[in-house]
Amino acid sequence: MRLLKLEENGTFNLTKHPANKIPKYAILSHTWGAEDEEVSFKDMKRGAATSKTGYEKIQFCGCQAAKESLKYFWVDTCCIDKSDNQELQGSINSMFRWYRDAEICYVYLSDISGGVSVRDGELSREWKRDFRKSRWFTRAWTLQELIAPKSVQFFSKEGERLGGKRSLEQTLFEITGIPPEALRGCPLSNFSVEERMSWAKSRQSKYDEDAAYSLLGIFGVFMSPLYGEGKEYTFYRLQKEIKTREAHLTGKSIATIHNPSLRITDPHDDKRRIENTKGDLLEDSYSWILDNTEFRQWQDDEQSRLLWIKGDPGKGKTMLLCGIVHELKKSVVKMDLLSYFFCQATDSRINNATAVIRGLIYLLIDQKPSLISHIRKKYDRAGKALFLDANAWVALSEIFTNILQDPSLNSTYLIIDALDECVEDLPKLLKFIVEQSSALPREFLKKAKRRVRLSLELNMESVSAAVGMFIQWRVLQLSQDNKYDNKTREAVQHFLSSNADGTFLWVALVCQNLKDVRKRNVIKKLDTFPPGLDSLYQQMMQQLSSSDDADVGKEILALAATVYRPITLEELVTLTEQLKEMADDPESIQEIIEHCVCKDFLFAKAFDKVFPYGTEATHHTIFSKSMQEMSRTLRRDIYNLDALGYPPENVEQLDPDPLSASRYSVDLQDGGAVDSFLRKQYLYWLEALSLCKSMPKGLVSMTKLESLIQLVRDAHRFIMSHKWAIENSPLQAYISVLIFSPTGSLIRDILKKEEPCWISIKPGIGDKWSACLQTLKGHSSYVSSVAFSYDSTRLASASHDNTVKIWDPSNGDCLQTLNDVWIRHRSENLLWLPSEYRPSCSAVSGNTIGIGVGSGRPWLPIHAHHLVSRIPCRFIV
């Protein structure tokens, strides 16, 4: 980059700087006069600059920069050698960046004279009129010169300062139509292509092509300037480049955002669920924190980037977080990002450190799709294994760090609720937070066992006032629903206010119990509620134990406290024998469920009552009931897909869903039940795993059972060998999987009836599984060396094809894209071929498929009833 330097004697000299050593500089924005009036690069070189009218602008910029203690400055008329086409091309494509990186931009308005008035930072009416008419707002190149710099100052032709981009923000918006967020530095990708185009529609340029070239930085694209090509063709090229960039940034990102690999949960939905479960978000119950000293310090002080909130159970921390999210959405500017995550110990999807990072990344990319670039490189190599394998935490924490350091981000607010419910890898998450907090733009965390910045117990007056507002709201609801008279309403409100002790949950539970109490009995009922959460839980347990539903209630409590994720009502009925009679009466089931108390209390204070035979008995019950349900419901082609190569991501869930009661995954551990299940319904289970997108869980289950019985060992080899085919096309469990399994496979022999009858001549397959557990296929030439990673979770292979591939030895996945090979007819996938059977040549003729295999195995003619006629085929193998 070439810059002007103000020397001590008041002269200006041109200096040149490499891209990595550019000093701080100011930059000039102006409108060009006549060509012979402006100071050119050649004029500066010849020492003829001072004779030109345009030299006044250079003097102005240099002197103004000196006042800002800046020795260097840039002026477009003389800092570019326009006779050098290569330099001119580079300059046009670098212009936006040069203005963006400048310390300050001085706008020299040659058509605005002094004598204007500025009162209290607001232009006078007379000044506004002149300012709006300035030629500077009509020129094409000045659009990026207004948007790109972080600081812009306007000056009259006499050098009188008129105001800055921030102080004149509203006026600039009225003149240009550019939103204040864009003027403040919001990433331009946040604005649509159409909106950005609209900012330039009335602007003009000396050369027609410049109307397009001046927009390169606005859209972040690169184009070679071709003066003389005409405005129409220049804009055609620009639109083409914009479409290419938009597709690059958003095409794959949108697919990835909605891909289950990244989206383990949608925190937006989690927030709405929590608010619906706990009652509507009441502004008066959280608004106190907005004026809290510690909260204001965190929000206003750039040095206070990390805030911890701590409070006892039931104090309303989660709803407080929901309220803060709600307020931040309203207050943060468009350029800021807000991401949040709600941990829940009872849900294995969202109770671990990796899930927290995934959820935060998901929301950030949802708001700013261009951030997907930080994931794409790793995701393109590893696929969904990036989020699932043993190194997921390492990869995602690195990606998350890179996202937070993205230069296009302004302020980023991160909120994590219930860190103490992160039951897996919490130390890793805490360490990551502490290490990164100095680098993060903003981070908001709560409930971690570290130094507390904001304690609810130390703000009991505010919390109690918030609980008081919550009580008023809940009592009003009860009064309207149950038609309380004034005496009853006042009694309920007084009782709740006197005993709440600043605990939202206690109030909510008491109100829930009062919901079905007749009005005449309400005052008497109030005396039965003890103060304190534990006492209230104890009373609820006693009431359950003495009720007619004691046995089923305790069974439900045991199940709810044991399952690895929240289950649906339909799944609960499946796992609870005593509820099956009430399967068609959800209201009765709901009535029993309402007696449930919190999991922590169950394990700490009521373990013997709920688990009289220990948690192992409950696990066995869940396992047995799940096996019975799957044996009853699973069948071949349960979704009626029919198409043999139909991918699971295109499957629409049926209503009613035949798998709805079977979606709760279990570990298969009982030998007898497993033996029966595998002999009768193993393939149906594989299909269901694919449809539920749970193939990895199936592989894990088989690994655990491998040492038990010979049948399970065969089933394990079965799933290892054919995992890819079934995972990508569920119905291949009945086609390719059976045909290409050894004739001695127990699973193949038992399920022989499932083999397709339309394949008349089958390939010659050995009777035993190969000694080779897995074939890692992907190189196109000899493999020269292999090496395991230090933890044996990765295998690297180097080949004479000049590539190195990284493998996951646990499942055989190559962390590169592998090409799938199908036999197809009329664009329909019929038969997936394992690597050793992939053809060097193949053909479909009539109703016969012929395959020539490069490995030297015999060619394979397959007779298919889908095809019309039969013509012999011959291949050279």
Image (cartoon, grey):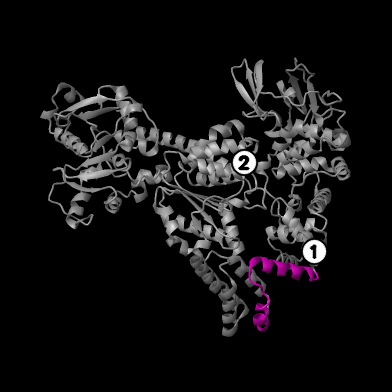
Residue at the image position 69 percent from the left and 51 percent from the top:
565
Q: Is residue 583 above or below residue 424?
A: below
Where residue 742 sits in the image (x, y, percent)? 84, 27
Q: Label 2, secondary structure: give it.
A: loop
Alpha-carbon span between mark 2 and mark 1: 38 Å
Label 2 or label 1, whichever lies nearer to me, is: 1
Of 567 and 735, the residue lying toward us: 567
Where residue 295 sits in the image (x, y, percent)? 45, 57
Looking at the rendering, the stretch of residues picked out in magenta corresponds to 519-548
Q: Quadrant of the N terminus?
A: top left
Give the crowd class for mark 2: few <14, some 14-19, many >=20 residues within 10 Å. some
- In the picture provided, is 513 more to the left or to the right than 78? right
- In the picture provided, is 522 more to the left or to the right than 687? left
Q: Is residue 47 above or below residue 64?
A: above
Where residue 349 sits in the image (x, y, percent)? 65, 48
Which residue is labeled 1 in the image? 552
For marks 2 and 1 on the same chain, the one whose residue lies earlier in the sequence? 2
The count of marks equals: 2
- Kindly indicate the quadrant of the structure image that contains residue 66: top left
Which residue is labeled 2 in the image? 261
Q: Is residue 649 above or below residue 88?
A: below
Q: Does the residue at mark 2 contact the one at mark 1 (Cβ under 8 Å)?
A: no
- Kindly indicate the quadrant of the structure image that contains residue 42: top left
User: What amino acid is labelled 2 in the image?
Assistant: Ser
User: What amino acid is labelled 1 in the image?
Assistant: Val
